Amino acid sequence: MEYIRYSAAACQTALSNPAERRQMRANTDRILSMIDSAVAGSVPFLPVRLVVFPEFAHAAPVFATAAELIDKLAVEIPNEHTDRLAAKAKEHGIYIQSGSMLEIDPRWQGAVFNTTCLIGPGGILYKYRKVNTWIPYEVHTSPHDIEGYDEPLFPVADTEIGRLGCAICYDWLFPEALRQLAANGAEVLIRVSAYMDPWNATPPMDWWTVINRARAIENMAYVVAANQAASLHQYPPYSWSGGSQIVDFEGRLLADASPGPGERIVVAPVDISALRHERLTRRGHHMLAHLRTEAYPVYRESIYPPAGPRPASGTVSYDLNNQMIDESKSRIDKDQN
């Protein structure tokens, strides 16, 4: 078995929100500088090969409508930011999970996606578009909700540092999303998040830590989780408490940034060889191998969005999100009573 061991770095950012495309360049400048710092800091130790950034590190959905996001902030991918990250990945021989940005794609007119890219020395390896948008507030589009969408919802990249897959923020509250990544082969589950108070790493509402550890245990996979750490002043109306973490495949917390706003880089070892040995030899607590898929009829019918015609791309709004949530809740209540 090939021996694969390296360090991963979860880099939390504290950047102001761009209000127009040209302002994204300053955020990318800082991201590139943090990559240099993460790599330099590991030189005397186990080298960093994977660097992860938070949700909205490049740009956040600071406007209330999809139309405004498309007009003022959304970009196609690849773009100048992903090109600069690819050059940096090649310079250092590393893999970078980009902070997310708002994406438009000529294939899907009217849709605006919350997208992160895994970028290696050879360029973009995958784009991940957030499947479980944080409804009702987020008005970008889930690729799941587009009729005829034919790209993988949960891509996994097979790289020299292991098989890597990513999900964004609210996705992680759905164990199904990370289970699908693991079923697709992911050995490192990457969390790109903008997780705010009070659901962060501080008891009694430390959802952040609970979920990171649970998903690692459930899927026998490493978790590298980078969280937004902008202050209330930088990122109203929320405060963002960082707490970026790295967790091993048995749920051990290997690295943990102290909760609170501000830039941090936390680094920990990722031992893919040990993980592969464990997956190969373990009998007990091998949930991927023990999964009784037919036992769960809940997955045989639509819940959200409710069954029926889906709204056209570009029509997503706070009010429409609430309407569909109410329809889903009504049907669930009916089925349960």
Image (cartoon, rainbow, N blue to C red):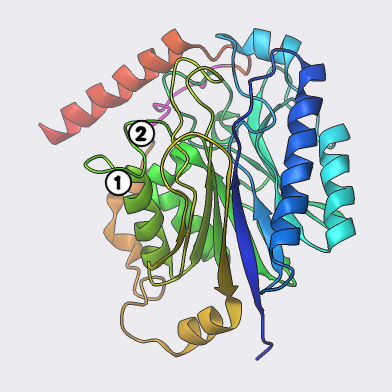
Residue drawn at x 54%, y 15% is: 316
Q: Amino acid at mark 1?
A: Val
Residue drawn at x 39%, y 26% is: 306
Quarter of the figure with the C terminus: top left
Give me the disc on residue 19.
Answer: none
Residue drawn at x 67%, y 25% is: 59
Counting from the top left corner in percent of width and height, residue 149 is at 65, 36
**Is 274 placed left or right of 296 in the picture?**
right
Q: Are marks 1 and 2 in contact (CB under 8 Å)?
A: yes
Distance in Å between CA atoms under marks 1 and 2: 9 Å
Q: Amino acid at mark 2?
A: Ile
Q: Main secondary structure of the magenta part?
A: loop
**Is 33 placed left or right of 287 in the picture?**
right
* Residue topped by disc 2: 303
Label 2 SS: loop
**Dot placed on the residue nearer the N-terminal end, 1 or 2:** 1
Which contiguous range is marked in magenta?
303-311
Counting from the top left corner in percent of width and height, residue 8 is at 62, 62
- Tell me, yes or no, whether the highlighted magenta stretch contains residue 69: no
Counting from the top left corner in percent of width and height, residue 245 is at 47, 54
Q: Is residue 16 above or below residue 86?
A: above
Q: Is residue 199 above or below residue 218?
A: above
* Residue topped by disc 1: 298
Label 1 SS: helix
Q: Nearer the viewer, residue 85 or 150?
A: 85
Q: How many marks?
A: 2
Counting from the top left corner in percent of width and height, residue 71 is at 74, 10
